[in-house]
């Protein structure tokens, strides 16, 4: 790496862009001359618990497609650099715990997952020809310390929804995460 002199007393100067591409840092030496070194790569590990339902909460995610839906969804997420930690669903909604890719937004991940799985489900028979996911979604942060608890919760969806509807569950998440919402726009 070439030496880049800096004015005496200039301190540290960072150059580059937000993606960390081509970023260099000019470090001041005790003598006032600087040298250039590449900054380390950008790293992140953001865990997300994603929830969304079928349009109008139609109960169409049947046992005969559920496992394949989970695998297909996992493949989409993997290809987006956002590997799934666990995917589970019941008849009217899906839960996905995944690691958010460093270079993608949650909305991009959701759009691609919904679009890809919606097209796939429609190929599974006449009963799925009109399948759609709801327009919205809920995405909730997961701390590393609570990941096991969240995974257990997602794994137990069938049991959990014997006593609670999707809407009751979703409202609880919104309250727990202190998310303001308008009831008339929360459902489609």
Image (cartoon, helix red, strand yellow):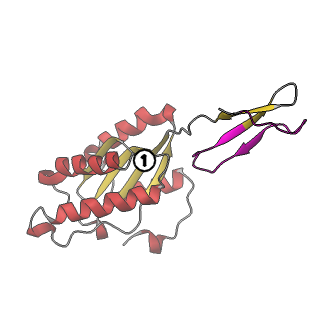
Name the residue at 13% across, 64% down.
123
- The front one of 109 and 170 is 109
Residue 105 locus on image (x, y percent): 48, 55
Going by the image, does 174 lie left or right of 12?
Answer: left
Q: Quadrant of residue 28?
A: top right
Q: Which residues are magenta?
A: 3-25
In the displayed structure, would residue 111 be above or below residue 2? Answer: below
- The image shows residue 54 at horizontal and vertical percentages of 29, 64
Residue 59 seen in the figure: no
- Mark 1, residue position: 49
The quadrant of the image that shows the C terminus is bottom left
In the image as oriented, which residue stretches furthest toward the left?
126
Q: Residue furthest right?
A: 9
- Identify which residue is drawn at 39% across, 58% down: 110
Q: Any magenta on residue 22?
A: yes
In the rendered image, residue 65 lying in the magenta stretch gets the answer: no
User: Under tag 1, what secondary structure?
Assistant: strand
Whole-percent x, y for residue 38 in the image: 63, 35
Q: Would you say the magenta stretch is mainly helix, strand or loop?
A: loop
* Residue toward you, 162 or 174: 174
Q: Is residue 59 left or right of residue 180?
A: left
Residue reaching furthest to the front:
2
Q: Residues within 10 Å of mark 1 (few under 14, many from 20)?
A: many
Q: Position of residue 152 (x, y in %)?
A: 35, 36
| Left or right of residue 152: residue 105 | right
Report the number of numbered marks: 1
Q: Quadrant of the N terminus?
A: top right
Asked if residue 2 can be seen in this view, the reply is yes
């Amino acid at each position: 790496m070439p030496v880049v002199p800096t004015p005496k007393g200039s301190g540290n100067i960072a150059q580059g862009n937000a993606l960390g591409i081509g970023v260099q840092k000019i470090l001041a030496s005790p003598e006032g001359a600087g040298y250039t070194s590449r900054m380390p790569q950008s790293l992140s590990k953001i865990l997300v618990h994603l929830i969304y339902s079928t349009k109008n909460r139609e109960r169409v995610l049947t046992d005969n497609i559920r496992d394949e839906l989970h695998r297909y969804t996992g493949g989409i997420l993997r290809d987006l650099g956002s590997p799934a930690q666990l995917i589970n669903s019941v008849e009217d909604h899906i839960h996905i715990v995944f690691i958010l890719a460093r270079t993608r937004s949650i909305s991009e991940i959701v759009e691609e997952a919904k679009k890809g799985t919606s097209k796939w489900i429609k190929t599974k028979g006449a009963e799925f020809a009109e399948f759609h996911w709801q327009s919205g979604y809920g995405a909730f942060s997961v701390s590393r310390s609570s990941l096991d608890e969240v995974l257990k919760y997602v794994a137990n969806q069938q049991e959990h929804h014997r006593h609670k509807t999707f809407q009751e569950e979703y409202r609880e998440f919104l309250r727990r995460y202190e998310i303001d919402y308008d009831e008339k726009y929360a459902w489609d």
